[in-house]
Amino acid sequence: MKEIIVAPSILSLDYANVSEQLQILKESKAEWLHFDVMDGHFVKNLTFGPDILKGFKKATKMFMDVHIMVEDPSFVAKLFIEAGADMLTFHLEAINGIEECIALCKWIRKQGVQAGVSVKPNTNIEELLPHLKEIDMILIMSVEPGFGGQSFMAHTLEKVQLLRKEIDRYGYDLKIEIDGGINDQTAPLAVQAGCDVLVAGSYIFKGDIEKNIDRLLLCQK
Ligand code: DX5
Ligand code: ZN
């Protein structure tokens, strides 16, 4: 059985109760924490800078999965790598062509950090396929990036299926992450299509955090 990773998105954390909620996450079965970094330009929302990641890093040993939705990924990647990112995922749409994309992946790996590439719901992944060896994770957005709480776009699973086929065919060591609208109804579809990592914000933090994480993990059975 393939092991699924749940990555709670701290975008939906209750910021009036950060330490309490972080304690629950640390004791839960979630292994990763997902950080949505937004610059107000690439998406019409603004979140946090690297000092917030540094703070979380001091409080937990969880794997720091940083998703940057920004116009200047090279600049922002450096800041979050210095702050302790374990996985740094940037957007293909924010970069000037596939060569620059792969060059940034190589640079991220050189810093000892895993490199991820993300695509919006309507962006094709074909141009990434010849370069899968240079990438540690592909993040398929299943909502338009920018805000939590949106509905899952099922057509994005076609990209997951295509990627899963390529990965299995050539035996690549590459994870598929899905982000947006993941709950106990959509998670099984994502896992069935071939996802390894499930990001979830509003579903996990509305109600019992630990139970909701457990429910998502049940999808792999
Ligand atoms: C959206 C973010 C997501 C978001 C998911 O731009 O990338 O990580 O937090 O939130 P939910 O799970 O509520 O769709
Ligand atoms: Zn995200």
Image (cartoon, rainbow, N blue to C red):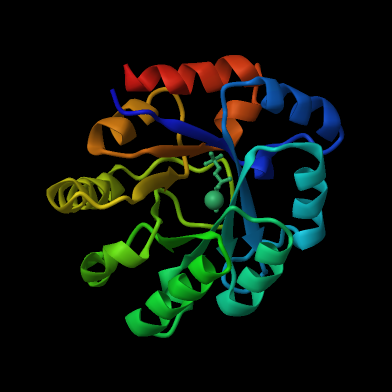
Position of residue 208 in the picture relative to residue 14 (left or right): left
Q: Residue 8 location, x and y as percent?
A: 59, 36
Task: Please report the residue visible at 15 percent of the width from the left and 47 percent of the height from the top.
Answer: 165
Position of residue 13 in the picture relative to residue 168 (left or right): right
Task: Please report the residue visible at 57 percent of the width from the left and 32 percent of the height from the top.
Answer: 31
Question: The C terminus is located in which quarter?
Answer: top left
Q: Is residue 161 above or below residue 102?
A: above
Task: Please report the residue visible at 26 percent of the width from the left and 47 percent of the height from the top.
Answer: 160
Q: Is residue 69 above or below residue 22?
A: below
Q: Within the image, what quadrant is residue 10 found in?
A: top right
Q: Is residue 88 above or below residue 142?
A: below
Q: Residue 74 location, x and y as percent?
A: 58, 78
Task: Please report the residue visible at 72 percent of the width from the left and 22 percent of the height from the top.
Answer: 24
Q: Nearer the viewer, residue 129 or 149?
A: 129
Is residue 208 in sight in this rendering? yes
Q: Residue 2 location, x and y as percent?
A: 31, 28
Q: Within the image, what quadrant is residue 23 found in?
A: top right
